[in-house]
Image: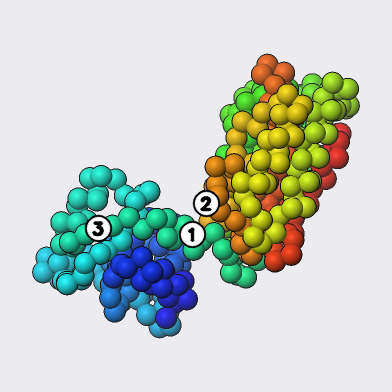
Amino acid sequence: MNEKIRLLRERLRSLKMEGMIVTNPVSIKYLTNIENEGTLLITRKENIFLTYTMFLESVKNTVTINDEIIVADFRDVSKDEYENFFLFCENIGFEENYVTYKQYHYLKQKYRVNNLAETENIIEKLRAVKDQDEISKIKKACELTDKCFNHLLEFIKIGTTEKEIALEIEIFFRTNGAEGLAFDPVVAIGQNSANPHWNPTDRAVKMADLILIDMGCKYEGYCSDMTRTIFMGCILEEIKPVYDLVLKNQLYTTQEIKEYASIKTLSQMVESNFKLNNFDLIHSLGHSIGMETHEIPYINSKNDTFLKENMVIANEPGIYIPDKYGIRIEDTILVEKNGCTVLTKSPKNYVII
């Protein structure tokens, strides 16, 4: 059987559930590699993917015999068959963070489920720990991100606008092997960088400007995420202590990343160090990365869980001074048993162009 579905079945049993209705396209792709629209049913004995006529051939070409997935057309399933998929089952799981209230009642009625129960992010938790194939794809996405950054150091000149830089990022990724962007790039010049999620404008680079660039690409379904704060011509003296503080905390927490490291403790380290210098960490220290840019676990002081080997996370401390500037430094990092590997390797020490 498909290994990911096998693990899902184990987790469902631990929650005393006899099956699951999977409707989130990201979850379906993760479990089956199917990218077409449809619904995945994990029943007591079978794995069934229901789809539309137009997608049948594509789906059948995607799944293998070893996957043990039955593919069927929605139109060929009778009302009685829908009601029999989970016959005599007490608890069937659904994706509570994806399914709307209306969809919940539709699924409950359509499949005649006695108790359609929340699964506590069961698939998202499986996705948090990557296998070697997933890690290799994320590594490739990170390599492309580093290459893009090096290209930008040559591309950005005085007069280049935020929009032009953002467009160049997308062009570079799409013409160098990536599927495209992992997310819309954040390109923020000068005081615009004080907004952590700034949308690029026609603001042009001037001498002594700070330029914050947050970007990532998607390679074979997996994402990278990296932020660098760079400088045109020189770095102003007033900015240096703030930049040094962010970099120091980014490097220090990276050294502490390993299996069983406390997520809360990692975040509290930065929060405390920032407080001592009269700054606040206004967003999470980081997040997991995989098929989506932001996945669980989130790295913040409210999270009582621990890192696991082969998680891939972002470490992104930032300081933002309203109407002046913002500094953020972010890497994509692979959690290992006794430490970690930083997958994004672009320079961080006073990058001046």
Q: Earlier in the sequence, mark 1 or mark 2?
A: 1
**Residue indicated by mark 1:** 125
Q: Which residue is mark 3?
A: 116
Secondary structure of the residue carrying numbered label 1: helix
N-term mark: 3 or 1: 3
Kind of residue indicated by mark 3: Leu
Q: Is residue 328 visible?
A: no
Residue drawn at x 17%, y 71% is: 87
User: Which quadrant holds residue 117?
Assistant: bottom left
Q: CA gap, disc 1 to disc 2?
A: 7 Å
Q: Going by the picture, which residue comes out furthest to the left? A: 80
Taking the image as drawn, is residue 202 in sight?
yes
Dot 3 surroundings within 10 Å: few (below 14), some, or many (20 or more)?
Answer: many
Q: Are marks 1 and 2 in contact (CB under 8 Å)?
A: yes
In terms of secondary structure, where does tag 2 sit? strand
Where does the N terminus fall, quadrant-wise? bottom left
